Amino acid sequence: MKPPRRLLGTLLAAALAAGAALPARGEYADVVLNRRAEKEGVRPVVFPHWFHRIRFRCKVCHQELGFRMRVGTNDFRMADIIDGKFCGACHNNDVAWGPERCDLCHSGKPGLPTGIYGGHETNGPGRW
Amino acid sequence: MKTHAATLAAILLAAAPPALAQAGKDLYAKTCAVCHATGIAGAPKYGSAADWGPRIAAGLPKVYANALKGTAKGMPAKGGNPALPDADVKAAVDYMLAAVKGAGAPAAAAPAKEAPAKEAPAKEAPAKEAGRPPPPKAEAAARPEAGTAAASAPAAPAAPPVQLALAAPAGAEANSFNRLLKPAEKRNPAPADDGIHDPANDGTHALMAPLSAYAGLPRSLAGNRINWVEALGQKKIDPRWDRTDLKAEPVIMDMNVVREVKGSMPDVVYPHKQHTEWLDCSNCHPAIFVPQKGANSISMASILLGEKCGVCHGKVAFPVSECRLCHSKKKEPAAARAQAPAPAAK
C-alpha cells in the first residue's frame, strides 16, 4: 500500500514541478539564494524581505552590512556568516538565531534558481 | 432544512458576542497559528476534524483548561503568553473549534463514541464540514450587517449560510484561469504553502507566516498588500535604523523632485522624505541616480527591466501597477494647453 502511494506522490510532485500548475509564488520580495547552497548539499536559502523590513530599515542591510541591491551579486559563504559578516551580523544567537540552525534559512525547495520571487509582480516586463 | 436550522443555530451560538469572536480570530492569527495552522509539534491542526475530534469528545471545559494551563504534550499555557486574558484565550479556542464542527453541539453528543455516530450526525457532519471553513470569515462579514441594519436588502437571515456554503468553493475557482489574479485566500501564503519553501523541511514549519505579522498594518492593493510607508508613518512598525543602536534616527530629507513626463500620464513627484525614512543616500546616489537635475534618463521600460526606480519598485517596494502613487501631479488639461499655447506661465 505504501510504496505505490509514495510513487504516486513523487510523480505528482514531479508533474507539479515540471508544469506550470503550481508556479513558485512566495511572498512578494522573497529572495532565493542558490548560488552555492545546493552544490554544497543543502537546500537553497529563502530570505523574506517582509519579515526583515518590519524590524530593520533597508539601510541596515543594504548599507551597513554591505548587501548589494541586485539578486545574485552578493558572493558570500557560510564562513563569512559565522565570522559575523552579512547575515551573521544579526544571525549570531544574539539578535536572531545563529548559523547552526541550518534548516530555518536553508528551507527552499531544491532546484529553485537564485532570484527574487513573489508572484508576477516581481517577474519583470514579460509578465506585465 | 432541519440541518440548515441546526447550522444556523450553531452559527448564532458561536458568533453571539462578535467582539469576542473577533478577538479570538485575531489572537489565533497572531499566536495560535504558529503551531495550529500547520499542526507542528503534534498540535491539533486548524480545520482538521480528525485532530480535534478526540479533544472535543473530552468536553469543552477540558479543551479550555488545556489552552489556559498547557499540556504535557507541548501546548504552552496560554500559548506561551501568560499576559493574555482568559477570555481571549477561550475566544481563540472557540474560533478554532468553530472551524471543525458545529461548535458546541457535538461536544455533548460525542463523549460516548470517539467517531461521531453514523446516522443523523454523519449526515449533518458533511454539511457542516463543507459549510464550515468559509463561514468564520463569512459570519464576521455577515453578522455586523445583520446586527446594525436589521433588515438589509439582499438576504433574509436564514439564507446566507446555505448560499455561502454552496457559493464559496465555486467562487474560489471561477477566476482561476487567470494566473495573475490571485483570489484573496491565495495571497500572502504561509511558508509551507508558498511554493518556494520546502514543506519537507522541518524548519519551514517553524517560520512565521506573513499574515500573522500583518495584523493591524495598513493595507494596500499590491506587493505584500501592506502599505509600508503608511505603517511606518503611523508607527505601527518601528524598524531599526541602526543594527545595534536602538535610538538612532534617520536623517530625513524632505524634498520633492518633479519629473515632467511625455505622455498623458500625470507628472511624477518623487518624494525624498519617504525614501530617506528607509534608505541611506548612498543606496541610490550616485550608482542608480546621478544627484543632478536632468542628468537621469528614466523610462517605464527601464523600470520594468529593473533599472532606476525598478531596482526596488517591482521587487520589494510597491510594483509599477500602482501608477498613481508616482504619477501624482496633475498636468494642466490638454484642451487648455491646445487652445491657449501662448500664456506659458499658466
Image: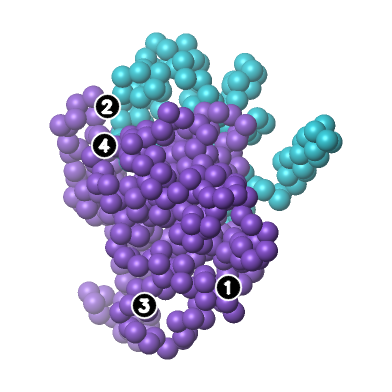
Chain colours: A cyan, B purple
- Residues under labels 2 and 1: Cα distance? 58 Å
Q: Three-letter amino acid code at disc 3?
A: Glu
Residue receiving disc 2: B243
Q: Three-letter amino acid code at disc 4?
A: Pro
Residue at the spot 41% in from the left edge and 44% down from the top edge: B62
Residue receiving disc 4: B82
Which mark sits nearer the N-terminus, 4 or 3? Answer: 4
The answer to whether residue B236 shows anywhere in this view is yes
Quick check: B233 above or below A114? Answer: below
* Residue B4 position in % (x across, y down): 55, 75
Is label 2 or label 4 in front?
4
Residue receiving disc 1: B3
User: Label 4: few (<14), some or many (≥20) within 10 Å?
Assistant: few
- Residues under labels 3 and 2: Cα distance? 47 Å
- Residues under labels 4 and 3: Cα distance? 35 Å
Is label 1 or label 4 in front?
1
- Residues under labels 1 and 3: Cα distance? 24 Å
State the residue in front, B173 or B311. Answer: B173
Which mark sits nearer the N-terminus, 2 or 1? Answer: 1
Which numbered marker is on residue B145?
A: 3
Q: Three-letter amino acid code at disc 2?
A: Arg
Residue at the spot 68% in from the left edge and 59% down from the top edge: B118
**For the residue labelled by badge 4, is the local secondary structure a helix, a strand or a loop?**
loop
Residue at the spot 71% in from the left edge and 50% down from the top edge: A21
